[in-house]
Image (cartoon, rainbow, N blue to C red):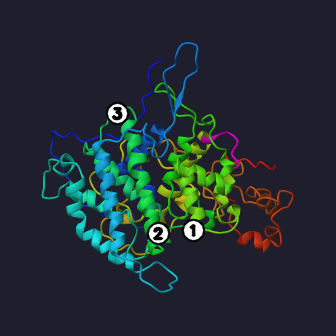
Amino acid sequence: MPAINVPKLSGLDDGEAHTFATPLKRINEGHDVSRFLTTKAYRDIMVFALQLNRAMFPQCGPKPDDQTQKAQSWEIGSHHVSISAVVRQLQRLLITLNSIIDEVPPDPGPRRFGNVSFRRWYELVEGRLPRLMEQYLPVKVLSFKKTSSIDSQAELKSYLLGAFGSPQRLDYGTGHELSFLAFLGCIWKLGGFDPSSSGNEERGIVLGIIEPYLEFVRRLIKSYTLEPAGSHGVWGLDDHSFLPYLFGSAQYGPAISDDDETPVEGSLANAPDPADVTKAAAVERERRKNMYFAAVGFIYDVKKGPFWEHSPILYDISGVRAGWAKINKGMIKMYVAEVLSKFPVVQHFYFGSLFSWDEDPDALPPLATIHTSAQPIRSQPTDPVVRSSQLPSSQKGSTGAPLISSTTAAPSPFVGTAAPWAKQPAVTSPTTAFPSRTEQQIISQTPRLPPNLSSQRLTHASSSRQAVADMPPPTKAPWAKDRNG
Protein backbone atom coordinates (compact mmCIF):
# COMPACT_ATOMS: atom_id res chain seq x y z
CA MET A 1 0.00 0.00 0.00
CA PRO A 2 1.43 3.43 -0.93
CA ALA A 3 2.13 5.92 1.82
CA ILE A 4 -0.60 8.41 2.58
CA ASN A 5 0.12 11.74 0.94
CA VAL A 6 -0.17 14.13 3.89
CA PRO A 7 -0.19 17.78 2.78
CA LYS A 8 2.74 19.84 4.01
CA LEU A 9 3.27 23.57 4.11
CA SER A 10 4.93 24.60 0.85
CA GLY A 11 8.25 26.41 1.00
CA LEU A 12 9.52 29.23 -1.19
CA ASP A 13 11.99 28.63 -4.01
CA ASP A 14 15.29 29.85 -2.56
CA GLY A 15 16.62 30.35 -6.08
CA GLU A 16 14.16 33.16 -6.76
CA ALA A 17 13.85 36.53 -5.06
CA HIS A 18 10.68 37.02 -3.04
CA THR A 19 8.62 40.16 -2.55
CA PHE A 20 8.18 40.50 1.18
CA ALA A 21 5.54 42.79 2.68
CA THR A 22 5.10 44.47 6.03
CA PRO A 23 2.20 42.59 7.70
CA LEU A 24 -0.98 44.64 7.93
CA LYS A 25 -4.26 44.39 9.81
CA ARG A 26 -7.02 43.18 7.48
CA ILE A 27 -9.77 41.90 9.76
CA ASN A 28 -11.68 44.99 10.85
CA GLU A 29 -15.30 43.84 10.89
CA GLY A 30 -17.20 40.64 11.51
CA HIS A 31 -17.69 39.75 7.85
CA ASP A 32 -13.93 39.98 7.31
CA VAL A 33 -13.70 36.69 9.20
CA SER A 34 -15.61 34.94 6.40
CA ARG A 35 -13.21 36.51 3.93
CA PHE A 36 -10.29 35.29 6.04
CA LEU A 37 -11.57 31.72 5.75
CA THR A 38 -11.05 31.93 1.98
CA THR A 39 -7.47 33.21 2.08
CA LYS A 40 -4.13 31.58 1.46
CA ALA A 41 -3.20 32.47 5.03
CA TYR A 42 -6.02 30.36 6.47
CA ARG A 43 -5.15 27.49 4.14
CA ASP A 44 -1.49 27.59 5.18
CA ILE A 45 -2.30 27.85 8.90
CA MET A 46 -4.50 24.77 8.73
CA VAL A 47 -2.04 22.79 6.60
CA PHE A 48 0.79 23.56 9.02
CA ALA A 49 -1.30 22.78 12.11
CA LEU A 50 -2.50 19.45 10.67
CA GLN A 51 1.02 18.61 9.53
CA LEU A 52 2.35 19.08 13.05
CA ASN A 53 -0.66 17.30 14.54
CA ARG A 54 -0.20 14.11 12.50
CA ALA A 55 3.49 13.92 13.42
CA MET A 56 2.54 13.75 17.11
CA PHE A 57 0.63 10.47 16.78
CA PRO A 58 2.65 7.50 18.04
CA GLN A 59 4.46 5.62 15.30
CA CYS A 60 4.45 1.90 14.58
CA GLY A 61 7.91 0.42 14.84
CA PRO A 62 9.41 -2.44 12.80
CA LYS A 63 7.49 -5.69 13.12
CA PRO A 64 9.76 -8.62 14.05
CA ASP A 65 8.72 -12.11 13.01
CA ASP A 66 5.80 -13.45 15.03
CA GLN A 67 5.67 -10.38 17.20
CA THR A 68 3.34 -7.42 17.34
CA GLN A 69 4.44 -3.98 16.28
CA LYS A 70 5.91 -1.83 18.99
CA ALA A 71 4.52 1.69 19.19
CA GLN A 72 6.86 4.62 19.67
CA SER A 73 5.19 7.52 21.47
CA TRP A 74 6.48 11.06 21.69
CA GLU A 75 6.63 12.41 25.22
CA ILE A 76 7.82 15.78 26.43
CA GLY A 77 11.57 15.60 26.90
CA SER A 78 11.86 12.18 25.22
CA HIS A 79 15.28 11.31 23.77
CA HIS A 80 13.42 9.61 20.90
CA VAL A 81 12.49 13.03 19.49
CA SER A 82 15.22 14.40 17.23
CA ILE A 83 16.16 18.00 17.93
CA SER A 84 17.81 19.75 14.99
CA ALA A 85 20.28 22.62 15.20
CA VAL A 86 17.59 25.11 14.15
CA VAL A 87 15.27 23.90 16.92
CA ARG A 88 18.13 24.22 19.43
CA GLN A 89 18.72 27.81 18.39
CA LEU A 90 15.05 28.68 18.78
CA GLN A 91 15.09 27.08 22.22
CA ARG A 92 17.93 29.42 23.15
CA LEU A 93 15.89 32.35 21.87
CA LEU A 94 13.04 31.39 24.21
CA ILE A 95 15.45 30.99 27.12
CA THR A 96 16.79 34.49 26.46
CA LEU A 97 13.29 35.98 26.31
CA ASN A 98 12.43 34.16 29.53
CA SER A 99 15.45 35.63 31.27
CA ILE A 100 14.29 39.17 30.49
CA ILE A 101 11.42 38.59 32.93
CA ASP A 102 14.03 38.57 35.69
CA GLU A 103 15.10 42.07 34.62
CA VAL A 104 11.57 43.45 34.99
CA PRO A 105 9.99 42.27 38.26
CA PRO A 106 6.23 42.77 38.62
CA ASP A 107 5.08 46.10 39.96
CA PRO A 108 4.23 45.63 43.68
CA GLY A 109 0.84 46.31 45.10
CA PRO A 110 -2.64 44.86 44.53
CA ARG A 111 -4.33 45.45 41.20
CA ARG A 112 -7.39 44.03 39.54
CA PHE A 113 -6.01 43.64 36.02
CA GLY A 114 -2.63 42.88 34.44
CA ASN A 115 0.60 44.16 35.92
CA VAL A 116 1.89 47.27 34.16
CA SER A 117 5.47 45.99 34.34
CA PHE A 118 4.59 43.76 31.39
CA ARG A 119 4.71 46.87 29.21
CA ARG A 120 8.31 47.49 30.25
CA TRP A 121 9.19 43.85 29.53
CA TYR A 122 7.57 44.15 26.12
CA GLU A 123 9.49 47.34 25.34
CA LEU A 124 12.79 45.68 26.20
CA VAL A 125 11.98 42.67 24.00
CA GLU A 126 10.88 44.89 21.11
CA GLY A 127 14.12 46.83 21.27
CA ARG A 128 16.32 43.74 21.43
CA LEU A 129 14.40 41.59 18.97
CA PRO A 130 16.33 42.51 15.78
CA ARG A 131 19.61 41.52 17.42
CA LEU A 132 18.11 38.39 18.95
CA MET A 133 16.73 37.31 15.60
CA GLU A 134 20.13 37.76 13.96
CA GLN A 135 21.68 35.73 16.76
CA TYR A 136 19.27 32.78 16.84
CA LEU A 137 17.49 32.50 13.49
CA PRO A 138 19.04 30.63 10.53
CA VAL A 139 21.12 32.76 8.20
CA LYS A 140 19.31 31.41 5.15
CA VAL A 141 16.02 32.61 6.61
CA LEU A 142 17.22 36.14 7.35
CA SER A 143 19.15 36.50 4.08
CA PHE A 144 16.45 35.14 1.78
CA LYS A 145 16.57 36.91 -1.60
CA LYS A 146 14.27 39.92 -1.80
CA THR A 147 12.95 42.21 -4.52
CA SER A 148 12.60 45.35 -2.39
CA SER A 149 13.93 47.01 0.72
CA ILE A 150 11.53 44.96 2.85
CA ASP A 151 13.18 41.72 3.98
CA SER A 152 12.09 38.57 5.75
CA GLN A 153 12.80 40.09 9.17
CA ALA A 154 9.87 42.47 8.76
CA GLU A 155 7.41 39.59 8.62
CA LEU A 156 9.18 37.38 11.15
CA LYS A 157 9.40 40.17 13.71
CA SER A 158 5.71 41.01 13.36
CA TYR A 159 4.59 37.46 14.13
CA LEU A 160 7.13 36.85 16.88
CA LEU A 161 6.36 40.13 18.65
CA GLY A 162 2.65 39.35 18.40
CA ALA A 163 3.15 36.05 20.21
CA PHE A 164 3.72 37.42 23.72
CA GLY A 165 0.45 39.16 24.49
CA SER A 166 -0.83 42.72 24.26
CA PRO A 167 1.01 45.49 26.16
CA GLN A 168 -2.02 47.76 25.69
CA ARG A 169 -4.66 45.38 27.06
CA LEU A 170 -2.28 43.43 29.32
CA ASP A 171 -3.72 40.15 28.10
CA TYR A 172 -2.76 36.95 26.31
CA GLY A 173 -4.88 34.45 24.37
CA THR A 174 -5.18 32.05 21.48
CA GLY A 175 -4.66 34.84 18.95
CA HIS A 176 -1.15 35.41 20.30
CA GLU A 177 -0.55 31.67 20.25
CA LEU A 178 -1.67 31.71 16.59
CA SER A 179 0.90 34.41 15.87
CA PHE A 180 3.67 32.15 17.21
CA LEU A 181 2.44 29.31 15.00
CA ALA A 182 2.65 31.70 12.03
CA PHE A 183 6.19 32.69 13.08
CA LEU A 184 7.26 29.04 12.91
CA GLY A 185 5.36 28.67 9.62
CA CYS A 186 7.37 31.56 8.16
CA ILE A 187 10.63 29.85 9.11
CA TRP A 188 9.35 26.64 7.48
CA LYS A 189 8.43 28.48 4.27
CA LEU A 190 11.83 30.14 4.14
CA GLY A 191 13.65 26.81 4.35
CA GLY A 192 14.78 27.04 7.95
CA PHE A 193 13.48 23.58 8.86
CA ASP A 194 14.17 20.24 7.18
CA PRO A 195 11.03 19.34 5.16
CA SER A 196 12.16 15.79 4.31
CA SER A 197 12.50 14.41 7.83
CA SER A 198 9.41 12.12 7.77
CA GLY A 199 7.87 13.82 10.79
CA ASN A 200 11.06 14.11 12.86
CA GLU A 201 11.40 17.86 12.34
CA GLU A 202 7.71 18.40 13.00
CA ARG A 203 7.98 16.59 16.32
CA GLY A 204 11.03 18.66 17.16
CA ILE A 205 9.03 21.83 16.41
CA VAL A 206 6.13 20.78 18.66
CA LEU A 207 8.06 19.37 21.61
CA GLY A 208 11.26 21.36 21.20
CA ILE A 209 9.80 24.80 20.46
CA ILE A 210 6.03 25.04 20.98
CA GLU A 211 6.00 23.28 24.36
CA PRO A 212 8.87 25.45 25.75
CA TYR A 213 7.08 28.49 24.31
CA LEU A 214 3.91 27.53 26.20
CA GLU A 215 5.89 27.11 29.42
CA PHE A 216 7.49 30.52 28.86
CA VAL A 217 4.09 32.10 28.24
CA ARG A 218 2.69 30.52 31.39
CA ARG A 219 5.45 32.23 33.33
CA LEU A 220 4.58 35.53 31.63
CA ILE A 221 0.93 35.09 32.58
CA LYS A 222 1.70 34.31 36.21
CA SER A 223 4.43 36.94 36.57
CA TYR A 224 2.38 39.80 35.13
CA THR A 225 -1.14 38.45 35.83
CA LEU A 226 -2.07 38.78 32.17
CA GLU A 227 -5.80 38.69 31.49
CA PRO A 228 -7.35 36.12 29.14
CA ALA A 229 -7.76 37.62 25.66
CA GLY A 230 -11.01 36.91 23.83
CA SER A 231 -11.95 34.31 26.43
CA HIS A 232 -15.40 32.76 26.81
CA GLY A 233 -14.84 32.47 30.52
CA VAL A 234 -15.86 29.08 31.88
CA TRP A 235 -17.57 28.35 28.56
CA GLY A 236 -14.26 28.29 26.72
CA LEU A 237 -11.87 25.38 26.43
CA ASP A 238 -9.00 27.29 28.06
CA ASP A 239 -8.44 30.90 29.03
CA HIS A 240 -5.20 31.26 27.11
CA SER A 241 -4.18 28.33 24.87
CA PHE A 242 -5.52 25.76 22.44
CA LEU A 243 -2.61 24.07 20.65
CA PRO A 244 -1.51 21.92 23.63
CA TYR A 245 -4.91 20.22 23.61
CA LEU A 246 -4.62 19.51 19.89
CA PHE A 247 -1.09 18.11 19.96
CA GLY A 248 -1.48 16.53 23.40
CA SER A 249 -4.50 14.49 22.36
CA ALA A 250 -2.52 13.28 19.33
CA GLN A 251 0.28 12.12 21.65
CA TYR A 252 -2.15 9.61 23.19
CA GLY A 253 -3.73 8.54 19.90
CA PRO A 254 -3.26 5.05 18.41
CA ALA A 255 0.03 4.25 16.71
CA ILE A 256 0.11 4.74 12.93
CA SER A 257 2.47 4.12 10.05
CA ASP A 258 3.10 6.21 6.95
CA ASP A 259 0.48 4.09 5.17
CA ASP A 260 -2.31 4.93 7.61
CA GLU A 261 -4.84 7.70 7.56
CA THR A 262 -4.85 10.00 10.56
CA PRO A 263 -6.99 8.06 13.06
CA VAL A 264 -10.30 9.37 14.37
CA GLU A 265 -10.89 6.78 17.11
CA GLY A 266 -8.87 4.78 19.57
CA SER A 267 -5.99 5.40 21.94
CA LEU A 268 -2.45 4.31 22.56
CA ALA A 269 -2.22 1.23 24.75
CA ASN A 270 -1.82 2.21 28.41
CA ALA A 271 -2.78 5.83 27.70
CA PRO A 272 -4.49 7.49 30.65
CA ASP A 273 -8.25 7.74 30.62
CA PRO A 274 -9.55 11.14 29.45
CA ALA A 275 -11.41 11.36 32.75
CA ASP A 276 -8.07 11.50 34.56
CA VAL A 277 -8.02 15.26 33.95
CA THR A 278 -10.32 15.51 36.97
CA LYS A 279 -7.78 13.78 39.21
CA ALA A 280 -5.07 16.10 40.49
CA ALA A 281 -2.61 13.28 41.15
CA ALA A 282 -2.98 11.89 37.62
CA VAL A 283 -2.59 15.35 36.12
CA GLU A 284 0.58 15.96 38.12
CA ARG A 285 1.99 12.66 36.88
CA GLU A 286 1.09 13.07 33.21
CA ARG A 287 1.84 16.79 32.79
CA ARG A 288 5.55 16.05 32.64
CA LYS A 289 5.01 13.83 29.59
CA ASN A 290 1.98 15.14 27.72
CA MET A 291 1.00 18.58 26.41
CA TYR A 292 -2.74 18.10 27.07
CA PHE A 293 -2.13 17.32 30.73
CA ALA A 294 0.50 20.06 30.97
CA ALA A 295 -2.16 22.58 29.93
CA VAL A 296 -4.66 21.11 32.39
CA GLY A 297 -1.97 21.19 35.05
CA PHE A 298 -1.59 24.95 34.53
CA ILE A 299 -5.33 25.30 35.10
CA TYR A 300 -4.90 23.50 38.42
CA ASP A 301 -2.06 25.92 39.23
CA VAL A 302 -4.12 29.06 38.74
CA LYS A 303 -7.71 28.01 39.51
CA LYS A 304 -9.34 26.60 42.59
CA GLY A 305 -12.53 24.68 43.17
CA PRO A 306 -14.12 21.65 41.47
CA PHE A 307 -12.77 20.96 37.99
CA TRP A 308 -16.25 20.58 36.49
CA GLU A 309 -17.13 24.02 37.81
CA HIS A 310 -14.22 26.11 36.48
CA SER A 311 -13.56 24.01 33.32
CA PRO A 312 -16.93 22.57 32.21
CA ILE A 313 -15.91 22.10 28.57
CA LEU A 314 -12.81 20.09 29.44
CA TYR A 315 -14.88 18.17 31.96
CA ASP A 316 -17.44 17.49 29.26
CA ILE A 317 -14.73 16.17 26.93
CA SER A 318 -13.38 13.93 29.69
CA GLY A 319 -16.41 11.68 29.16
CA VAL A 320 -15.34 10.64 25.65
CA ARG A 321 -15.37 6.87 25.29
CA ALA A 322 -14.02 6.53 21.75
CA GLY A 323 -10.45 7.36 22.70
CA TRP A 324 -7.93 10.17 22.37
CA ALA A 325 -8.08 10.14 18.57
CA LYS A 326 -11.76 11.03 18.81
CA ILE A 327 -10.86 13.92 21.09
CA ASN A 328 -8.17 14.99 18.62
CA LYS A 329 -10.66 15.02 15.76
CA GLY A 330 -12.98 17.21 17.82
CA MET A 331 -10.14 19.54 18.71
CA ILE A 332 -9.40 20.15 15.03
CA LYS A 333 -13.01 21.14 14.43
CA MET A 334 -13.04 23.29 17.53
CA TYR A 335 -9.84 25.08 16.53
CA VAL A 336 -11.48 26.24 13.32
CA ALA A 337 -14.73 27.24 15.01
CA GLU A 338 -13.47 28.73 18.28
CA VAL A 339 -10.15 30.24 17.21
CA LEU A 340 -9.91 30.83 13.46
CA SER A 341 -13.59 31.73 13.02
CA LYS A 342 -13.89 34.12 15.95
CA PHE A 343 -13.51 37.86 15.37
CA PRO A 344 -12.13 38.66 18.87
CA VAL A 345 -9.33 36.14 18.25
CA VAL A 346 -8.27 36.73 14.65
CA GLN A 347 -8.88 40.49 14.44
CA HIS A 348 -5.30 41.14 15.59
CA PHE A 349 -3.69 38.68 13.16
CA TYR A 350 -1.63 40.50 10.53
CA PHE A 351 -1.14 39.50 6.90
CA GLY A 352 2.02 39.84 4.82
CA SER A 353 3.39 37.86 1.88
CA LEU A 354 4.11 34.61 3.72
CA PHE A 355 0.65 34.42 5.28
CA SER A 356 -1.27 36.24 2.62
CA TRP A 357 -4.69 37.87 2.52
CA ASP A 358 -4.94 36.84 -1.15
CA GLU A 359 -7.75 34.49 -1.98
CA ASP A 360 -7.02 30.80 -2.19
CA PRO A 361 -7.92 29.78 -5.78
CA ASP A 362 -8.92 26.30 -4.62
CA ALA A 363 -11.17 27.51 -1.82
CA LEU A 364 -14.81 26.53 -1.48
CA PRO A 365 -17.60 28.93 -0.50
CA PRO A 366 -17.51 29.26 3.31
CA LEU A 367 -20.20 27.73 5.44
CA ALA A 368 -22.46 30.30 7.08
CA THR A 369 -22.60 29.22 10.71
CA ILE A 370 -23.44 30.77 14.04
CA HIS A 371 -19.73 31.55 14.39
CA THR A 372 -19.34 33.42 11.11
CA SER A 373 -22.76 35.09 11.08
CA ALA A 374 -22.85 36.39 14.66
CA GLN A 375 -19.85 38.68 14.25
CA PRO A 376 -19.57 42.34 15.28
CA ILE A 377 -20.11 44.97 12.59
CA ARG A 378 -18.58 48.41 12.66
CA SER A 379 -20.79 51.12 11.27
CA GLN A 380 -17.98 53.14 9.71
CA PRO A 381 -14.72 51.28 9.09
CA THR A 382 -11.68 53.49 9.40
CA ASP A 383 -8.94 51.11 8.25
CA PRO A 384 -8.31 51.89 4.57
CA VAL A 385 -6.79 48.49 3.86
CA VAL A 386 -10.07 46.59 3.45
CA ARG A 387 -13.54 48.11 3.42
CA SER A 388 -16.82 46.29 3.11
CA SER A 389 -17.39 47.82 -0.32
CA GLN A 390 -14.17 46.27 -1.56
CA LEU A 391 -15.16 42.71 -0.72
CA PRO A 392 -16.53 40.53 -3.54
CA SER A 393 -20.29 40.37 -3.45
CA SER A 394 -20.26 36.60 -3.83
CA GLN A 395 -17.77 36.13 -1.02
CA LYS A 396 -15.96 33.63 -3.17
CA GLY A 397 -13.94 30.84 -1.82
CA SER A 398 -13.07 29.15 1.35
CA THR A 399 -10.18 27.01 2.14
CA GLY A 400 -9.61 23.46 1.10
CA ALA A 401 -9.12 22.69 4.79
CA PRO A 402 -11.26 19.73 5.84
CA LEU A 403 -13.66 21.56 8.10
CA ILE A 404 -15.37 24.09 5.86
CA SER A 405 -18.01 22.98 3.38
CA SER A 406 -19.94 24.73 0.65
CA THR A 407 -23.33 24.23 2.27
CA THR A 408 -25.07 27.42 3.36
CA ALA A 409 -27.05 27.39 6.56
CA ALA A 410 -29.04 30.01 8.41
CA PRO A 411 -27.71 31.06 11.80
CA SER A 412 -29.18 29.73 14.98
CA PRO A 413 -31.62 32.04 16.77
CA PHE A 414 -29.45 31.60 19.85
CA VAL A 415 -26.13 33.40 19.87
CA GLY A 416 -23.82 32.93 22.80
CA THR A 417 -21.49 30.30 24.17
CA ALA A 418 -22.63 27.26 22.23
CA ALA A 419 -19.77 24.99 21.28
CA PRO A 420 -19.15 25.12 17.53
CA TRP A 421 -19.23 21.36 17.28
CA ALA A 422 -22.37 20.95 19.39
CA LYS A 423 -25.08 19.04 17.58
CA GLN A 424 -28.09 21.05 16.53
CA PRO A 425 -31.70 19.98 15.97
CA ALA A 426 -32.40 18.42 12.61
CA VAL A 427 -32.73 20.72 9.60
CA THR A 428 -36.34 21.08 8.59
CA SER A 429 -35.87 23.02 5.36
CA PRO A 430 -33.05 24.25 3.15
CA THR A 431 -33.43 27.75 4.52
CA THR A 432 -33.89 26.88 8.18
CA ALA A 433 -30.79 25.26 9.56
CA PHE A 434 -31.76 25.35 13.23
CA PRO A 435 -35.44 25.34 14.23
CA SER A 436 -36.42 27.47 17.19
CA ARG A 437 -35.69 25.67 20.43
CA THR A 438 -38.47 25.07 22.90
CA GLU A 439 -37.87 25.27 26.61
CA GLN A 440 -37.91 21.47 26.85
CA GLN A 441 -35.29 21.14 24.07
CA ILE A 442 -32.93 23.44 25.91
CA ILE A 443 -33.39 21.73 29.25
CA SER A 444 -32.88 18.26 27.72
CA GLN A 445 -29.55 19.21 26.11
CA THR A 446 -27.57 20.11 29.20
CA PRO A 447 -23.84 19.41 29.45
CA ARG A 448 -22.45 16.35 31.19
CA LEU A 449 -23.49 16.73 34.78
CA PRO A 450 -20.89 17.06 37.54
CA PRO A 451 -20.40 14.38 40.20
CA ASN A 452 -23.33 13.73 42.56
CA LEU A 453 -25.71 15.57 40.25
CA SER A 454 -26.37 12.87 37.66
CA SER A 455 -29.92 12.32 38.87
CA GLN A 456 -30.77 16.01 38.83
CA ARG A 457 -31.63 18.50 36.12
CA LEU A 458 -30.24 22.01 36.02
CA THR A 459 -33.27 23.69 37.54
CA HIS A 460 -32.23 27.25 36.82
CA ALA A 461 -33.11 26.68 33.14
CA SER A 462 -36.71 25.80 33.87
CA SER A 463 -37.52 28.39 36.50
CA SER A 464 -39.26 30.54 33.95
CA ARG A 465 -39.51 31.04 30.21
CA GLN A 466 -37.56 34.27 30.57
CA ALA A 467 -34.72 32.47 32.30
CA VAL A 468 -34.54 30.03 29.41
CA ALA A 469 -34.53 32.85 26.90
CA ASP A 470 -31.68 34.57 28.72
CA MET A 471 -29.44 31.55 29.16
CA PRO A 472 -26.74 30.67 26.62
CA PRO A 473 -27.13 27.54 24.49
CA PRO A 474 -25.58 24.33 25.82
CA THR A 475 -21.90 23.66 25.36
CA LYS A 476 -21.88 19.86 25.25
CA ALA A 477 -19.62 18.46 22.57
CA PRO A 478 -21.29 15.72 20.47
CA TRP A 479 -18.18 13.61 20.78
CA ALA A 480 -18.15 13.86 24.60
CA LYS A 481 -20.64 11.22 25.69
CA ASP A 482 -22.18 11.34 29.14
CA ARG A 483 -20.85 8.52 31.23
CA ASN A 484 -23.76 8.99 33.60
CA GLY A 485 -26.44 8.73 30.99
- Give the answer, above or below, for where 356 lies relative to 25: above
Mark 1 highlights which residue?
A: 302
Mark 3 highlights which residue?
A: 197
Q: Is residue 176 left or right of residue 371?
A: left
Distance between the alpha carbons at the discs numbered 2 and 3: 34 Å
> Nearer the N terminus, badge 2 or badge 3?
3
Residue 464, x across and y down, in percent: 82, 73
User: Dots 1 and 2: beta carbons under 8 Å?
Assistant: yes
Distance between the alpha carbons at the discs numbered 1 and 2: 10 Å
Q: Nearer the viewer, residue 320 or 109?
A: 109
Mark 2 highlights which residue?
A: 221
Which residues are the magenta region?
Answer: 318-324
Given the image, on which type of amino acid does mark 3 rest? Ser
Q: Which of the numbered marks, if any, corresponds to residue 189?
A: none
> Nearer the N terminus, badge 1 or badge 3?
3
Distance between the alpha carbons at the discs numbered 1 and 3: 38 Å
Residue 220, x across and y down, in percent: 43, 68
Q: Please report the residue visible at 34 percent of the width from the left and 58 percent of the height from the top.
A: 94
Given the image, on which type of amino acid does mark 1 rest? Val
Residue 28, x across and y down, in percent: 40, 67
Q: Please report the residue visible at 61 percent of the width from the left and 45 percent of the height from the top.
A: 327
Q: Is residue 121 left or right of residue 21?
A: right
| Residue 469 lies in quadrant | bottom right
Given the image, on which type of amino acid does mark 2 rest? Ile
> Nearer the N terminus, badge 1 or badge 2?
2
Q: Secondary structure at mark 3?
A: loop
Number of marks drawn: 3
Q: Secondary structure at mark 1?
A: helix
Q: Residues within 10 Å of mark 1 (few under 14, many from 20)?
A: few
